[in-house]
Image (cartoon, helix red, strand yellow):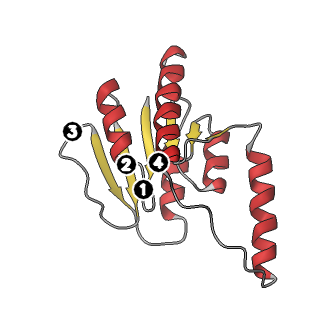
């Protein structure tokens, strides 16, 4: 079992490090530019080139059943789910086989509206509740994966 993090814009890296340390899990931080990580042998930093979706491609190729992927990227979440990984957004919402289709459809609708000139704004600001929900869901996902033998 390992945790793979789409790290460029991830607001919960410190929480991931704490939970991974508690459970003795390896973490791989994947980004397009160097990101400071704690000096810990179980935390690995992978810096990919700045090509389009390079970090996503690396994570999608590296994940497998037993991997826990942290990303806000819906298309990356879909790719990882297809590889058998468990996927969690930084706000604590899990991506599942049952929810990913709706998320992709909503993403496409919003992209079409933006392309048509609509000013939609972005996602709501990251909150304390998001951080708390993430910690609860991360802990729950780790426990479930461990029960599954990973």
Q: Are marks 1 and 4 in contact (CB under 8 Å)?
A: no
- N-terminal of the pair, mark 3 or mark 1, is 1
**Marker disc for residue 41:** 3
Crowd rating for badge 1 (residues with CA inside 10 Å; few <14, some 14–19, many 20+): many
- Point out the frontmost of discs 2 and 1: 2
Residue at the (75%, 55%) spot, across then down: 104
Secondary element at image label 2: helix
**Marker disc for residue 7:** 1
- Point out the frontmost of discs 3 and 4: 4
Return the residue found at the far left: 39
Residue at the (61%, 53%) spot, across then down: 76
Rendering quarter of residue 73 = bottom right
Q: Which residue is mark 2?
A: 13
Return the residue found at the far front: 128
**Marker disc for residue 128:** 4
Q: Are marks 3 and 1 in contact (CB under 8 Å)?
A: no
């Amino acid at each position: 079992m390992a945790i793979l993090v789409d790290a460029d814009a991830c607001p919960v890296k410190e929480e991931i490090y704490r939970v991974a340390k508690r459970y003795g899990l390896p973490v791989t931080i994947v980004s397009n530019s160097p990101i400071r990580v704690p000096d810990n042998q179980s935390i690995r930093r992978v810096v990919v080139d700045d090509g389009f979706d390079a970090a996503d491609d690396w994570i999608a190729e590296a994940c497998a059943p037993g991997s826990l992927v942290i990303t806000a990227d819906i298309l990356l979440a879909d790719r990882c789910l297809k590889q058998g990984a468990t996927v969690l957004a930084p706000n604590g919402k899990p991506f599942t086989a049952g929810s990913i289709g709706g998320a992709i459809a909503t993403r496409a609708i919003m992209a079409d509206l933006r392309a048509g000139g609509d000013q939609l704004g972005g996602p709501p600001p990251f909150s304390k509740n998001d951080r708390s929900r993430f910690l609860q869901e991360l802990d729950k996902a780790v426990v479930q994966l461990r029960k599954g033998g990973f």
